[in-house]
Amino acid sequence: MAVLPLLLCLLPLAPASSPPQPATPSPCPRRCRCQTQSLPLSVLCPGAGLLFVPPSLDRRAAELRLADNFIAAVRRRDLANMTGLLHLSLSRNTIRHVAAGAFADLRALRALHLDGNRLTSLGEGQLRGLVNLRHLILSNNQLAALAAGALDDCAETLEDLDLSYNNLEQLPWEALGRLGNVNTLGLDHNLLASVPAGAFSRLHKLARLDMTSNRLTTIPPDPLFSRLPLLARPRGSPASALVLAFGGNPLHCNCELVWLRRLAREDDLEACASPPALGGRYFWAVGEEEFVCEPPVVTHRSPPLAVPAGRPAALRCRAVGDPEPRVRWVSPQGRLLGNSSRARAFPNGTLELLVTEPGDGGIFTCIAANAAGEATAAVELTVGPPPPPQLANSTSCDPPRDGDPDALTPPSAASASAKAADTGPPTDRGVQVTEHGATAALVQWPDQRPIPGIRMYQIQYNSSADDILVYRMIPADSHSFLLTDLASGRTYDLCVLAVYEDGATGLTATRPVGCARFSTEPALQPCGAPHAPFLGGTMIIALGGVIVASVLVFIFVLLMRYKVHGGQPPGKGKTPAPVSSVCSQTNGALGPTLAPQAPESAAPRAHTVVQLDCEPWGPSHEPVGP
């Protein structure tokens, strides 16, 4: 019983369980300064010569500054588990690549600075997870493409977006229109050539829009501009005003910019680039009455055109005006025509009917319109019955070119000039069908050495009569291929793809080299054998001709022999009639002598005549005259 009190006295001396201790902070990365004594924690590594994000970061940090280093990439694991990070600066590094999901754990991040790097594109997954982002600075990169979904996660929270000093020619304007809370939008010093109407209509909190130093010739009036007062500079402007900066653009000062001319302004950076009468003039010094437009005038249209059914037809319409007119087409039935399975409308005013039908004939109307008005012109199209099949050269049976039905022929000069004159659809110059026959075609494509790791080329083609694709695999060192299994008189769509090994994923990928459309020659019809009556008549005429020729030759021979024998039949011995002149043979030194006469029965002998002297003689062989 004495043991129990002793145990009760010893219990208070037993060590109690200790409460959980805070996690030991990670050591500060080398050449960095860390603030870990009080909250918020921060890691400061500016200008530390870092080649990558330090792996020993304190994951509890709320501020991380890595500017002015040599970091080339941001990997997925570099910023993992930093759920409390509020400010991240990666400015002025050499970052070329940001892994998809690299910021996925930074759900509390408010500001991200990626300016002064070497990013060329921004995809949909690279900013995933930044659901509380307020400031995104991407200026001074080499951005040429911004994906439509790149800003989806931060579209509702973003207040400041800076895309200045990049190489952007196009923007996902629909995605930018969803940034309902953005206050400042910097698009200056890019390559933007146009802004769609209504691009900023939903940016109700926008306070500054900078579009200086782009390639804008005009700026369309936006509903946002009509709701808010506009100023060219913020100095002295009310808090509700929208500051619009647009200097350094090649502005075309016509009636479309009258609304911009009416803005209040306090700077002198803007100038007109065109038209020639206003080029170089200070934008604000041009009177509103000088901002004029010219209504369109149709300068060229296709003459009345007749084509057989089943053939294509191209209708052309050209117009001039200021601004440049937009050309549209209306069918004979009054429908507005556009791109469809049977028709294609091009910005240059060409309407191409791919396959005409008998009901397509009629009067097509070309409408050219701009801000100053519109002009119309009519083009008549007649669609006749399909042409009957014809033999080669229409009327004669000629052998195939080069004696080969598959002989390849380059396009004729006439067709080449016609194609050069046609300013319709742009052609793909990467793949060309340089020669084609009835059942064969020669396909050529340029060298694809810039694509590393090419394994082979793949040719895909199908004819207009079916939807079945035919594939051909070509060695990687080839740049041409001869197709020999084509059907005559058909149109083919052909594409060439490069099959290569993707260095990033190690998988096989394909990249299109180009596409082309061509038509094979119609098949030549065989010439039929001549009819039997024709052969019989020809043989009779030929045989009669031979007989007549033989008779004529026989008569001619008889006449010649009769003449040689002095008009007497050969073999009759008669005294020859007296002659009035005798020819003698001399050598040029002796006087004229009478040549001895050969007996009648002797055979005539040939003599080589040196000189013949002919003198008249009388009946008694005496010389006549003195």
Image (cartoon, rainbow, N blue to C red):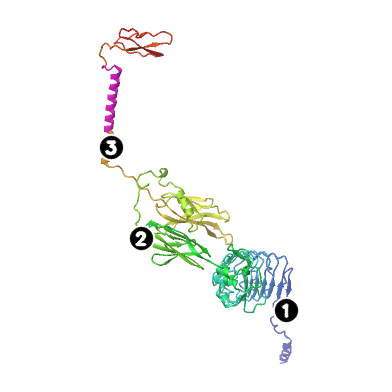
Residue 218 position by quadrant: bottom right
Look at the numbered discs 1 and 2 and tell me whether their residues touch, using CB distance below 8 Å: no
**At 31% across and 44% down in the image, what residue appears?**
528
Q: Residues within 10 Å of mark 1 (few under 14, many from 20)?
A: few
Q: Amino acid at mark 3?
A: Thr
Q: Which residues are magenta?
A: 543-568
| Mark 3 lies on residue | 538
Residue 344 relative to residue 282: left or right: left
Question: Which residue corresponds to mark 1?
Answer: 38
Q: CA distance from mark 1 to mark 3?
A: 119 Å
Position of the C terminus by quadrant: top left
Q: Is residue 265 in view? A: yes
Of pointers 2 and 3, the one earlier in the residue sequence? 2
Any part of residue 148 in sight: no
What separation in Å lies between label 1 and label 2 (alpha carbons)?
85 Å
Badge 3: how crowded within 10 Å, few (<14), some, or many (20+)?
few
Q: CA distance from mark 2 to mark 3?
A: 47 Å
What residue is disc 2 on?
358
Name the residue located 39 percent from the left edge and 45 percent from the top edge: 400
In the foreground, 589 or 510:
589
Q: Earlier in the sequence, mark 1 or mark 2?
A: 1
Eye-nearest disc, 2 or 3: 2
Check the image and report above or below for 185 versus 497.
below
The structure residue drawn at horizontal position 28% and vertical position 34%, both measured from the top left corner, is: 542
Total labels drawn: 3
**In the rendered image of this protein, does residue 321 appear above or below residue 439?**
below
Drawn side of residue 576 relative to residue 481, left or right: left
Q: Could you tell me which secondary element the residue under label 2 belongs to?
A: helix
